[in-house]
Image (tube, rainbow, N blue to C red):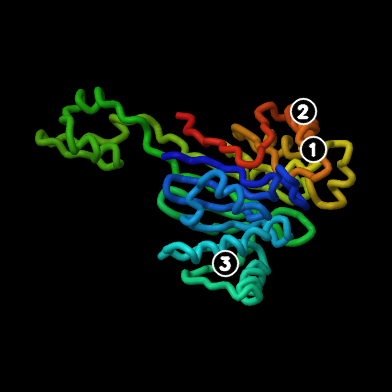
Amino acid sequence: MNLEAFILGTGGMMPLPHRHLTSVLLRREGDLFLFDAGEGTQVSLRRLNLRWKKINAIFISHTHADHVTGLPGILMLSSQVDRNEPLYIYGPPRIAEYVESSRRVLDMYINYEIVVREIEAPCLCHEGEGFRIRAFPLRHTKPCVGYVLEEDPRPGAFFPEKAEASGVPRGPLWSVLQGGSPVDLPDGRVVRPEEVMGAPRSGRKFGYVTDTLYFPEIAPNVSGSDLLVCEGMFERELLASAQEKRHMTAEQAARIALDAGGVKKLALIHYSPRYTEQNLKRLLEEAREIFPDTVLSRDRMCIPIEYLD
């Protein structure tokens, strides 16, 4: 089952010619989940030729303009296609007011159900077959949350030679064992899944953190993330400015990834507009001093999230 993160926008505060505002689309087979919807989100969706019409749910970190100004356009365009399923929108307090006032002032034509759920983190927001998405609190100038998508553990590897040695014939009974159920043989013996399969394997995990003051309690929430997308808005010499504005430096993002444990890759996002494409490398260098497996996310970058076993 494929799991991919599409970076739709990487900027903070204001869009630049080659840097839209922060937004990430996560695709898990037929499910599409949008995290924030900054200005320019639709442009990247179209340029990547993504099936944005099938977005299942949108997760808003907070209601600052650079994270929600792309949302009204997505809601309106979704009415131009056949949509039978509701669109879920999750976010902290006032996200419902923002959606409702946008619909009213813009006189939106909406021909599908929009379900807005204001959340109080920590909480479980959304779940489906084999996964769940939960929120945890961040510390910004207004209520703000981070999100993680976690998959259920997978069954262990199936060993055909062990099944045959146990007397289970090739065919449908193998599927029964792989599904986690024991098999009764004609001679009265019972073959259990653990006899022919390896230990359970972990699912994958995606973490999303942006617009927050650094604090150590972020790390446990994103531990084990195969991909952590985290804001690294400033370089270390601007730490005082970051703290005043309740943002993080790239160095602090790397500290979270390191302290969390088990993070496989850190992708920085939400850059200050003071940084040109060329001098963003300063953020990368500072982060890699602490967490070497760090990359600079770029608009319209695709990052596959692979199984490790």
Query: Is 243 left, or right, of 193 in this rendering?
Result: right
Q: Nearer the viewer, mark 1 or mark 2?
A: 1
- Closer to the eye: label 2 or 3: 2
Q: Quadrant of the C terminus?
A: top left
- Which residue is found at the position 65% from the left and 35% from the top? 266
Q: CA separation, marks 1 and 3?
A: 37 Å
Q: Residues within 10 Å of mark 1 (few under 14, many from 20)?
A: few
Q: Which mark is residue 285?
A: 2
Q: Residue at x 75, y 54 (%)?
A: 139
Please tell me how crowded label 3 is: few (under 14), some (14-19), or many (20+) other residues with Cα within 10 Å: some
On the image, the x and y values in percent for residue 19 come to: 71, 44
The percent position of residue 7, horizontal first and vertical second, equals 61, 43
Residue 117: numbered disc: 3
Mark 3 is on which residue type? Arg
Name the kind of residue labelled 1 in the image: Thr
Q: Is residue 183 visible?
A: yes
Which mark is nearer the camera, 1 or 3?
1
Instruction: Judge left or right: residue 18 versus residue 83.
Output: right
Is label 2 in a helix, a strand or a loop?
Answer: helix
Please identify the quarter of the rendering in which residue 265 is found: top right
Q: Amino acid at mark 2?
A: Glu
Answer whether residue 270 is visible to the viewer in this image.
no
- Label 1, on which residue? 276
* 61 is higher (above) or lower (below) than 185: below
